Image (cartoon, rainbow, N blue to C red):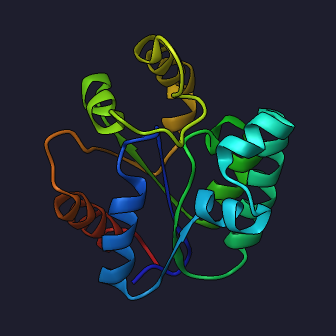
Amino acid sequence: MPDRPLILTGFMGSGKSSVGRVLAESIGCALIDLDALIVAEAGKSINEIFAEKGEAAFRTIESQCLERVLQGGIAVIACGGGVVIAESNRRMMRGQGVVINLTASLPVILARLEGVSDRPLYAGKDAANRVSALMEGREQFYADADIRIDTDNKSVEDVAAEILRFLKGLPN
């Protein structure tokens, strides 16, 4: 159905990977999880990359991987939550794909992230306040999307179905 990559953006815990799996299966294309690709290529966890090289180095690797996967044809690309920070990434995504932003409220995000240890920007004390500040700071970047879908109280399948309905209305 789509003639270009479908790019899922949103805060950590918004459902990008889960929705991406269902969406890719529904349209018969590959799912590319950008964070998983970075981990596989670096041979290190995102936590290790942040600890050893810092966030700026991680963002550079992330941008390079994004540019490469966008050239790979039709796929569903589940991006890391911070990929939207760089204007160059947003420009690439808008120019080469359909940008689908998944949103969720702060209480839902916090509930979904409870117990996770592989998210460097979530780790440590006072996570709720940090998550809230990060969400607020990124909102303007997340808003730069073709469609925004609230995932609160919706199943992964319902969110994927909503995306498919949107895609049917797009001109080819």
Give the position of the N terminus as an image quadrant: bottom left
Q: Residue 100 location in percent, x, y?
A: 44, 54
Residue 61 as seen in the image, left or right of residue 5: right
Residue 13 sits above or below residue 37 on the image? above
Q: Is residue 145 left or right of residue 43?
A: left
Point out residue 52 in the picture as x, y percentages from the top left corner: 83, 39
Quarter of image, res 34: bottom right
Q: How many marks?
A: 0
Residue 42's image quarter? bottom right
**Figure quadrant of residue 22:** bottom left
Return the x and y of residue 91 as percentages of the image width and height. Answer: 71, 50
Front-lying residue, 1 or 159 = 159
- At a point 15% along the width and 49% down the height, the residue shown is 154
Residue 106, percent across and down?
32, 23
User: Is residue 27 placed above or below 41 in the rendered structure?
Assistant: below
Q: Residue at x 57, y 48 (%)?
A: 80
Q: Is residue 8 left or right of residue 92?
A: left
Residue at 36%, 43% (x, y): give it.
14
Q: Is residue 132 above or below residue 72?
A: above
Q: Residue at x 72, y 56 (%)?
A: 92
